[in-house]
Image (cartoon, helix red, strand yellow):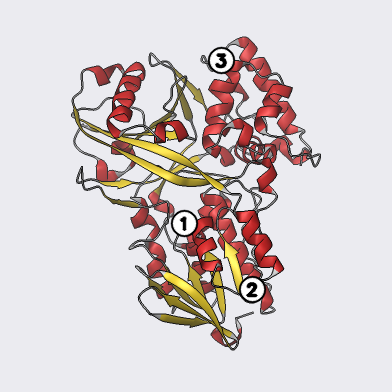
């Protein structure tokens, strides 16, 4: 059912949540105006030419998993399927260079990773036994209504220190960008089941071949080809109710009118926009809840060497303050540079490192990287930089996760989107896209349009069909 009289929609925010909402509604016949204060789309998932290096770099390496069905749907919608490189194997790299590979086999789910786990040399026999017991507990996990943290679960299931450090941290803690005591168990269970138990497809890792702003910039052409308009460098200051419509006023005096509004902005930006809207008990309750939210940073270190220092495309680094290695020279064709290496190192949940000086971080990164890659000792570091994304993900420990709002706001015809809203997923790009689709559905349903934009999770395969 098409929208009545091509209703106008203002989407505030050009991150993945706003992009998802805008693209879905534009595709369905709504007249979308997307307003973004920056000069690019993508929000925290962006890229830019770094003034100190002259290189186009991503603000942080973003990856998607095969279980990120809605993020994959958005990229498919934008015609970007060929711009994602997919990897089925994950390399766990130890100091000294020894590698263990986790990859699916032909065995039915949930046993598809078992052969590689048994062969992994980075785990002792006792580690493997406790990991297997933990996986079995996740397999049969049933929510009991209690808000338990991942740290409490790891202690309760007697996971060894090495199993926590070398298995659960790379696969869950680093992926969720928070310390175990701040991760709701339901988020850990959700991610692990979707990525590693339900199917072999769910754990595949997708890495963009394009800089992030170029990747997400495709949304502008998509929306405008369907009669909408994307306005960059447009900072909304306030909203006013004019009859049955909303009027958005920008800081430079522009005015935009629409029948509906989707606020797809970070929590702190939403608080500023809400301050000018009519107050009510519901709005005060929303403000109170969001005031408890905080953010977790991610630090990325970018290093350019005069030669190739590894044949790896990516790896998880074990027993190190550095967590992930991405070989951008091999991952992004635009960075291929004739036998040299451009390495990006990512440190998740990096509050302490975020407080360090740039030179200290680079020195630490070089010292650590040499422990894993002996070639680094002979290579010349040509240039380096550090990027600190202080608001990389929303911090949602167990007590706060229940405060995440749905798409409906306290104001008529205004809807909420963002990775911090109630999507059933932890704060992530997948959660952001889901929130955009959920908000678009809520808007459409108000107009008696039962269209579904949200894409279902992957279906269980193999023996997992009997465990769901």
- First in residue order: circle 2 vs circle 1: 1
**Nearer-N-terminus badge (1/3):** 1
Asked which quadrant contains residue 327, the reply is: top left
Q: Indicate whether 243 appears above or below 72.
A: below
Observer-nearest residue: 157 or 255?
A: 255
Discs 1/3, front: 3
Q: Is residue 414 above or below residue 332?
A: below
Query: Measuring 55% from the left and 16% from the top, which residue is drawn there?
Result: 119
* Residue 376 left/right relative to 318: left
SS of the residue at dot 3? loop
Query: Which residue is at a point 52% across and 39% down the rendered structure image?
Result: 204
Secondary element type, mark 2: loop
- Image quarter in which the N terminus is found: bottom right
Q: Which residue is mark 2?
A: 411
Mark sitting earlier along the chain (3/2) = 3
Q: Mark 3 = which residue?
A: 123
Q: Are marks 3 and 2 in contact (CB under 8 Å)?
A: no
Query: Mark 1 highlights which residue?
Result: 75
Name the spot of residue 109 as percent of width and height, x first.
67, 34
Vertical position of residue 256 compared to residue 165: above or below: below
Q: Is residue 149 visible?
A: yes
Residue 276, how many percent across, how many down?
Answer: 54, 72
Q: Residues within 10 Å of mark 2 (few under 14, many from 20)?
A: some
Q: CA distance from mark 2 to mark 1?
A: 31 Å
User: Quadrant of the image for the C terminus?
Assistant: top right
Query: Above or below — where is 161 with respect to 299?
Result: above
Query: Is 78 situated left or right of 68 in this image?
Result: left
Per the image, label 1 sits on a secondary structure element best described as: helix
Can residue 225 be spotted in the picture? no
């Amino acid at each position: 059912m098409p929208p009545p009289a091509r209703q106008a929609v203002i989407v505030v925010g050009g991150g993945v949540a706003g992009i998802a909402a805008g693209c879905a509604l534009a595709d369905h016949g709504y007249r979308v105006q997307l307003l973004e204060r920056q000069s690019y789309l993508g929000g925290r998932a962006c890229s830019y030419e770094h003034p100190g290096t002259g290189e186009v770099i991503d603000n942080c390496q973003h990856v998607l998993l095969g279980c990120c069905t809605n993020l994959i749907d958005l990229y498919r919608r934008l015609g970007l399927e060929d711009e994602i490189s997919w990897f089925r194997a994950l390399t766990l790299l130890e100091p000294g260079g020894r590698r263990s590979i986790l990859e699916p086999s032909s065995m039915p789910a949930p046993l598809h990773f078992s052969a590689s786990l048994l062969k992994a040399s980075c785990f002792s026999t006792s580690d493997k036994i406790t990991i297997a017991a933990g996986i079995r507990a996740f397999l049969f996990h049933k929510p009991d209504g209690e808000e338990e943290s991942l740290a409490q679960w790891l202690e309760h299931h007697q996971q060894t220190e090495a199993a926590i450090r070398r298995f659960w941290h790379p696969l869950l803690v680093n992926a969720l960008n928070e310390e175990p005591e701040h991760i709701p168990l339901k988020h850990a269970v959700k991610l692990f089941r979707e990525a590693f138990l339900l199917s072999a497809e769910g754990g595949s890792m997708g890495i963009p071949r394009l800089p992030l702003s170029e990747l997400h910039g495709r949304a502008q052409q998509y929306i405008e080809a369907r009669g909408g308009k994307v306005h960059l460098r447009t900072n909304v200051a306030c909203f006013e109710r004019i009859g049955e419509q909303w009027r958005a006023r920008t800081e430079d005096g522009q005015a935009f009118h629409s029948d509906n509004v989707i606020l797809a902005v970070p929590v702190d930006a939403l608080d500023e926009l809400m301050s000018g809207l009519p107050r009510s008990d519901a709005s005060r309750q929303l403000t109170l809840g969001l005031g408890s939210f905080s953010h977790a940073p991610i630090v990325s270190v970018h290093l350019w060497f005069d030669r190739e220092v590894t044949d790896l495309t990516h790896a998880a680094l074990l027993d190190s303050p550095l967590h992930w290695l991405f070989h951008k020279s091999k991952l992004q064709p635009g960075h291929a540079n004739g036998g040299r290496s451009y390495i990006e190192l990512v440190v998740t949940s990096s509050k302490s490192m975020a407080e360090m000086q740039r030179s200290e971080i680079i020195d630490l990164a070089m010292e650590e990287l040499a422990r894993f890659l002996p070639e680094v000792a002979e290579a010349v570091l040509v240039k380096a930089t550090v990027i600190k994304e202080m608001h990389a993900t929303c911090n949602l420990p167990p007590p706060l996760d229940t405060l995440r709002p749905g798409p409906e706001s306290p104001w008529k015809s205004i809807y909420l989107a963002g990775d911090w809203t109630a999507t059933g997923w932890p704060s992530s790009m997948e959660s952001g896209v889901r929130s955009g689709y959920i908000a678009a559905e809520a808007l459409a349903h108000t107009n008696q349009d039962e269209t579904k934009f949200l894409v279902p999770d992957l279906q269980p395969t193999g023996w997992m069909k009997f465990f769901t």
